[in-house]
Image (cartoon, grey):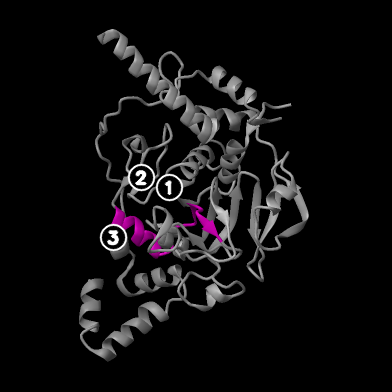
Amino acid sequence: MYNGLFTSAAASADGLKAWMDEWVYGCPDRSSYIDRYIKKFGSAALDELRAKPFYSSPANYGSAFTSRWDREGKERSMGVTLPQLEKLLQERGKVYE
Amino acid sequence: MSKPYTLDELLAITVAKEIHDYENVVLGVGVPMTAGALAKALFAPHATLMMESGIVDIRPLLSLNNIADAHSCRGFSYATDLFSAFTMTYRGFVDVCFLGVGQVDKYGNLNTTVIGDYEKPTLRLPGSGGAADFMSYAQRTVLTMRGGTFVNKLDYFTSPGYLDGGDSRDKTGLFPEGSGPSALISTKGVFRFDPETKEMYLAQIFPGVRLESIKKDVPWELKVAADLSATPRPSDEEINFIRDFAPELSAGRELAVELRNARIKEKADQRFVKNA
C-alpha cells in the first residue's frame, strides 16, 4: 500500500515533491511519522506490519568447544592453567596492584 | 584490596563501561567483543550486542575469531545479514560502536589503511572494513588503542572523527547531528573530546601510569582535564570475567604469542618422538 503510494507519487516530479513533503520533511521525528501513518491508514494496518515473534527451532551450529579452558583447566592455545598464567603475569611485572 | 590486574584488562573493563543499558552496540572482534560480553554480563544486561555480519543480540561464551564465528550464535535473537546490519546503521539505530586505532589525530580522525606512502607503504593495515560506515553513522564511537600511534597528520584518512574540529563534522550535513567519537581508551588512560573545539584531551589516567609517559606518545601539546582523575581500579568480578572469557587478552600479546609458540613446538616434538 505504502510502496504503491510512493511508486505512483514518484512518477512525476510534483508528485514526488508532495510525497517528500508529507512523509519526510513533514515528519520531524519517527513518532510523528508513525502518528501520520496511523492517521492515514489506521492502527490495524500498522499492526499488520509490526514484527511478531517468529522463532526458529533450536539450531546446532557445531562447535569443538565452548570455553577457552580445556577439561584439565588449561587454556587451549597457551597451554597454561589460570594459576600458572597469573603467576607468569606476576613474574613478568605485568600486573598492577 | 582486590586482585592485581594488567593494563590490557583495565583497558577492556574501562571500554565495557562505555556501554549503557538498553543500547544497540556494534562490536568487532578482539577488545570490543570482550568488553561487550563483560558489559552484557555485569553492567548492561539489556544492551543489544551485534556484529556487522548480521548476528543480533548475542551472548558470546568466549572471545571470537571472526565476525561470523559460530560461537557467537548462542542465544542470539535475530540473524540477518551484512546488508541489513549496515542499513540499520545508516538509519541511525546504532547507539555506540567500537573501533581500533592505527593512527589517530587530535580530532579523532582515523587511519587504519596504510602507514607511510599509499603506493609504497611501510605497513599495510586492514583498511576500513565497516569502520568508516560505523564511525559516520553510529551516535557514538569509542576508539580503542592497544598499539597504534597519535599523529599530527594521518598518512591516510580512513574514517571520519571530528574532521577539522569545532563544528566541522556537523557542518558537512553528512552525519547524524552530534555523532562522532566520544572517547579514546588506551592502555594508559581515557581521552575525551572537548565539547566546543572537539580536540582530544586526557580525562582519566590509569592508576600507576605517569602523565609524562602519556605525553611523550602525543606529538601535539596534549590538553589535560583540570579535574584529571585516576580510572577506577577494576573489581575481582570484572578481572575474573576477562580472564575466563579472553585469557589471551589478559596475557597480553607478547606472553600469549610466546606461550602459544612454545605449546606448538611441544606438541610437534611429542608427535616426533611418538613417530620415531
Query: Are dots 2 and 3 on a single chain?
Result: no
B98 drawn magenta: yes
Amino acid bearing label 2? Ile
- Distance between the Cα atoms at labels 3 and 1? 32 Å
Q: Which quadrant of the view contains residue B197?
A: bottom right
Within 10 angstroms of label 1, few (less than 14), some, or many (20 or more) residues?
many
Magenta residues span: B82-104
Mark toward the viewer: 2 or 3: 2
Amino acid bearing label 3? Leu
Quarter that holds the N terminus of chain B: top right
Q: Which residue is mark 3?
A: A49
Within 10 angstroms of label 2, few (less than 14), some, or many (20 or more) residues?
some
Q: Which residue is mark 1?
A: B28
| Residue B150: x %, y % from top left | 59, 57
- Distance between the Cα atoms at labels 2 and 3? 30 Å
Q: Which residue is mark 2?
A: B67
SS category of the residue bearing label 2: loop
| Between discs 2 and 1, the one toward the N terminus | 1
| Residue B268: x %, y % from top left | 33, 18
| Residue A33: x %, y % from top left | 40, 72
